[in-house]
Image (tube, rainbow, N blue to C red):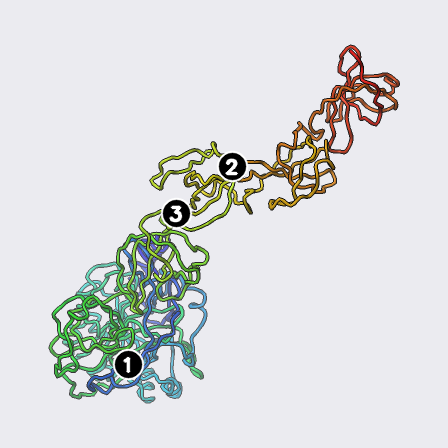
Amino acid sequence: MFRKKRSHFLLATLVLGSLSVSMTVLAETTQTSEVKETSSTIVGDTVENDLDVTTDLEEKNQPVISEVETKDTEVSIDLEEVSESEEAVLEEEEEFYYPSNRSDLEPSFRTFAAPRAKAKNDNLSIKDKNKPRADFIDVSSHNFDISVEEYKIIRSYGVKGVAVKLTEATSYRNPYAKKQIANAKAAGLIVSTYHYSWFKNAAQAKAEAQYFAQMANELGLPKSTLMINDLEDNDIKYREGHTENAKAFESELNRLGYSRVNHYLGLHWIRENRIDTNKLGNEKVWVAAYPFTPTSQQQHTQYGAWQWSSKMTFPGVHGVFDISSDYYGSYSEQTVSKPLPPQGNYISDGRYVEITKKNYSRWSSFDWDFRGKTDEIYGKTFQARGRYQHLNGSTYFSLYDNKGTWYGYLNADATTVLNGPQGKYISDGRYVSISKDNYTIWSNLNFSSKKGMTKDVYQKTYQAKGRYEHFNGSTYYSLYDGKGTWIGYLNDGGAKTIPNRSGVYISDGRHVTITKKNYNTWQNFSWKVRENSSEVYEKTFVAKGRYEHLNGSTYLSLYDEKDTWHGYINISATKVGDGAQGAYISDGRYATINQKDEILFNDFNWKERKSTNEVYEKTFNTRGRYQHMNGKTYYSLYDSNGKWHGYAESSLLKFGNGRQGAYISDGRTVKITKKNYSVWSNFGFKTEKHNTTNLLNQTFEAKGRYEHFNGSTYLSLFNDKDEWMGYLNANAAVFEEVIEK
């Protein structure tokens, strides 16, 4: 919807408004030709009913009060959207878009934004079943001539009345009005009339009322005709005094003999307190608010009528029409003088109320048959399916609970009208843990939009900053995370309250390895430090339990192999393993088997894969390792062909500085027997120190050797002067007797 606080809408309004000032003056003095009416609307949130709930309005066990009330009528329960804030401010205007600037004097850019594509481009059909009541239409020059036959078609679909635009300001008359009225009457429709208002003070209001009445008189309309003040133009919306000016307009029409005067207003005028409908009389207000997706839900029943679309079409009738529901019969019923009971006629309502005063009586009839006191139902929520405007000046609600049980008639003064079936926002502040994984988290409390499912946040901790005691009997928490981000509304059956922010203790049992340094383990959730993760880095623990903290982190409760507790640690500092071996840690070094008669394991159930005798002094790539709960480290070994050879405990290995593996002391004498072999300076194999062609048949001492990952053995050679000669592939030499010193 349009709001002054939204800068991009306000800027457009100010700019376009300034451009239109001179046009307005010129139009009021010179323009007499008709300009086709158009409508402008704004963007808001689509609201759809999730609960297909209907209730029977036949009031059980109560006296027959009026013919209207005792009809079996189905009414969809009004479940309005709630937008969450710290004060739980209800922003109902987001559900609608509105008419704006439909002046015949001032064709201009619209100051409100266009509605969503669906609302803007898709017309409605009178044949649509899921729609509010269609009691009357309103027409102006943009509808042109409407024949008697077309009006009869419209009437055949249940439409009973038509409001015809007569005038605007003090310079415009609808040139089609006379024929539109005559044809409507000939078709049997009830005719009312309206005037598009521009008045900015009481004097202008009187002048426009006189102009309106003059045309009505010239058209021969009876003084009993309903005369309507159409107050909608945005150029005057933010001026002061609308209530007083509207009353002056009404009073002037009354003085001229027109006793029935109502007021047409966009809902946003009311929401923004631009006008006081209580002073005008809510029953005299015809409110305009267009749901983006109309349903059979009747809304705004506290007013006299509700215009719910400007896009209605009828088969065989040209054009589109504004369509409205009539709650008092002012626009669609003959004004026949007939005696009313003291309580007046039954008026459909549908709002929700809380009993907020004690010592009020509830009545079974308007003969004042006592039914009970409000003390018995104090603080409870009911639906006022209907109401009566009693001759004594009081309004009486006809109250029902969520099971459809009737609680009688109650003076409205004993109640507070709520924003919807969700009830009022109640500040809470408790912490809750998500305890069920099959509940919906809602974006609103008309249950039309899902925000998520509890399976996605199962066992997480949130704060219920507020709650709603819903008319359906359930409590809904308004949940926030530790950063203040709103999570949504959740039925309290999907969560359990807990005493603090840490969350509930959740049994776990997984094994985790500490993989990050500089995290603390905590003594408690008052954040007393127990030890730093650097002290237990790459150790594996069993997380016997965990806590899903409000801050969004998971904290594990750590125990070592001796069942000693090591405190709470953020799970981000750990890696979860598949068992007591802990998590897989990427390694990548090269190690040589240096023990015989030991075992390489196939798994951590200690199934034997092979003996180290089979791979003694072989070099392997330790692609990864496990820091077992037993305190030992196990390496996962791969050969140069990518074949896995099992898990080796670290004591069976000696690590080298590269693919050559570990240095192995030797001491044997070797003789060079092959030419064209390089004697390398290093194991990068890029720098040749000598070549065997020049060393053929010479003898050297192999003080050590390397069992290289590539499968070759490299000897570290020294001459008789104890000078290092380099590394030589053992294939280029043969071993002789050990040199005696």
Q: Which residue is mark 3?
A: 549
Q: Residue at x 76, y 12 (%)?
A: 722
Q: Amino acid at mark 3?
A: His
Label at residue 539: 2
Label at residue 468: none
Quadrant of the rendered structure where residue 570 is? Answer: top left
Compare marks 1 and 2 and give the one earlier in the sequence.
1
Label at residue 57: 1
Q: Amino acid at mark 1?
A: Leu
Tag 3 near tag 1, CB within 8 Å: no
Q: Residue at x 29, y 69 (%)?
A: 471
Cα separation between marks 1 and 2: 70 Å
In this rendering, position of residue 115 left or right of residue 400? right
Q: Dot 1 lies on which element?
A: loop
Q: Is residue 537 above or below residue 34?
A: above
Q: Amino acid at mark 2?
A: Lys
